[in-house]
Image (cartoon, rainbow, N blue to C red):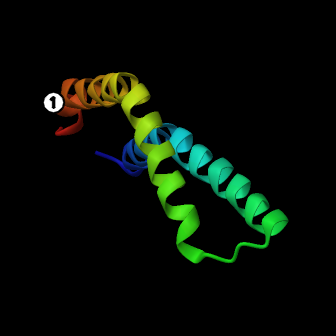
Amino acid sequence: MDQATVLQLGREAAVMMLTLATPLLGVSLAVGLGISLLQAVTQINEMTLSYVPKLAAIGIVLALLAPWMLNQMIRYMAGLLNALPALAR
């Protein structure tokens, strides 16, 4: 296994990680921004107010996207395991 192969495998792993994490992080960012705006408008300075809506939103998105995320992970791992004999040389 040469250096280019290792870099390619690392790049594919990083792309897969970002692909799977982006929807969850995006929802968390959007909900956090919305709660921050609500707190600024109403002048409610409760620090724990943003945690429950973020957790609920992430839970909902995770429940909705879990089949897609699992399919992506299975496809990535199947490709990696199929390429393993060629990578071991």
Residue tagged 1: 85
User: In this rendering, does residue 86 appear at all?
Assistant: yes
Left or right placement of residue 89 versus residue 45 in this view: left
Amino acid type at circle 1 is Pro
User: In this rendering, does residue 18 appear at all?
Assistant: no
Crowd class of label 1 (few under 14; some 14 to 19; many from 20; radius 10 Å): few
The residue positioned farthest toward the right in the image shown = 41
Assign the N terminus to one quadrant of the image: top left
Quadrant of residue 33 in the image? bottom right
| Element class at badge 1 | helix
Could you say which is closer to the camera, residue 80 or residue 7?
Answer: 80
Percent across and percent down for residue 87 are: 23, 36
Left or right placement of residue 21 versus residue 84 in this view: right
Left or right placement of residue 66 versus residue 39 in this view: left
In the rendered image of this protein, does residue 52 appear above or below residue 6? below
Assign the C terminus to one quadrant of the image: top left
Percent across and percent down for residue 18 are: 51, 44
